[in-house]
Amino acid sequence: MSIWFEPGTILRQRYRIRQVIGQGGMGQVYLADDLRLRGRLCAVKVIRHDPGLPPALQEELRRQFQREATVLARLDHPNLPKVSDFFSEGEIDILVMDYVPGPDLQQLVDEARQEGRFLPQEQVLEWAQQLGAALAYLHNQSPPIVHRDIKPSNIKLTPQGLLKLVDFGLVKELAADDATITVIQGKGTAYYTPLEQYGDAGHTDPRSDIYAFAATLYHLLTNQPPPSARERFLNPRSLAPPRELNPYLSPHVERAILWGMRLHPDDRPPSVEVFLDALLGPRPPRIPPLRARALEPQPQPEFPATPLDGVLVALVVIGALLALGLTLWG
């Protein structure tokens, strides 16, 4: 692996590089110290453009970087890392984000597989709710933001149990008439990439993220990634139902995952919210807990007296006197 910035390099007189912590087709991610905010660690994502590209195209990519970095810097969600800075130096573009400690979900599912166990369904569904909240936030921006590279290795779990969708690349291309901003680096990973994302002309929308979301859950719950969408297109029987691999799964969880992974976008859930409802399945209504109250004497009910009440009382008294007389005379 070729390292673009050696440890100790200082960028913009503020970010001191420690080490490489990730690498993709278009860039590298470094752990760095923020020299202005002492004690703060940050992730510095460096994107290098092909120097052989025509100058006009390089300039368009630079403008595109600035446009999309501005959008990402405005995002504020607990399940997304905060973008704090962006700038360009020479032929590279640089994005600075919060550093997220902790393992990624790829590491956790690999550990489970090696130990011969499955990740608990309830735990994975709790993670799914957090990831779904982040995606719903992105998709409901104006215009919608589509991530296009959701996979276990791009999802980190902090020591506090908070999930973070960490790998934000930058837009590769954004047509003037396109209704979405596409956050991407490269083409995505084949296991989690829907058919419509293949090829430069492929149109993606939030349903593309739903496919990758469902494929990620398939992997987390079965200990193996699904076959690629291309393989499934050529061989529809190649996708094993999740419960064949993990019999502990609930039927409604399997149905939701297979719905999210349908090859044609129109056949998938129309939104992340709908997908989550299907995934979480029937849930009992939440009954609020009773409030603690001090015990107080309760007033006894009073009933109006009736003539019949008087007769009954007299009969009781007479019966008692007769019993007493028989006792005395017996």
Image: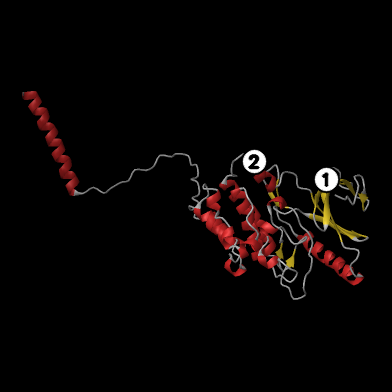
Outermost residue on the left side: it is: 330
For the residue pair 7 and 232, the one nearer the viewer reads as 232
Residue 298 in which image quadrant: top left
The 10 Å Cα crowd at callout 1, few under 14, some 14 to 19, many 20 or more, is few
The answer to whether any part of residue 44 appears in the image is no
Quadrant in the picture for the C terminus = top left
Sort mark 2 into few (<14), some (14-19) or many (20+) by Cα contacts within 10 Å. few
Kindly state the secondary structure of the residue where label 2 is placed. helix
Q: Amino acid at mark 1?
A: Arg
| Residue at position x 71%, y 61% in the image | 148
Does residue 214 sit above or below 248 in this rendering? below
Does dot 1 land on a helix, a strand or a loop? loop
On the image, numbered disc 1 is attached to which residue?
A: 40
Residue 133 in percent (x, y) is at 64, 56
Mark with earlier residue (1, 2): 1
Q: Residue at x 74, y 65 (%)?
A: 182
Residue 114 has which mark?
2
Residue 119 rendering spot, x and y as whole percentages = 60, 44
Q: Say which residue appears at 82% left-offset and 58% top-offset.
A: 26
Tell how many labels: 2
Left or right of residue 122: residue 3: right
Position of residue 7 measured from the top left corner of the image (x, y, whole percent): 90, 45
- Of residue 66 and residue 191, the one placed in the foreground of this image is 191
Which of 136/245 is in front?
Answer: 245
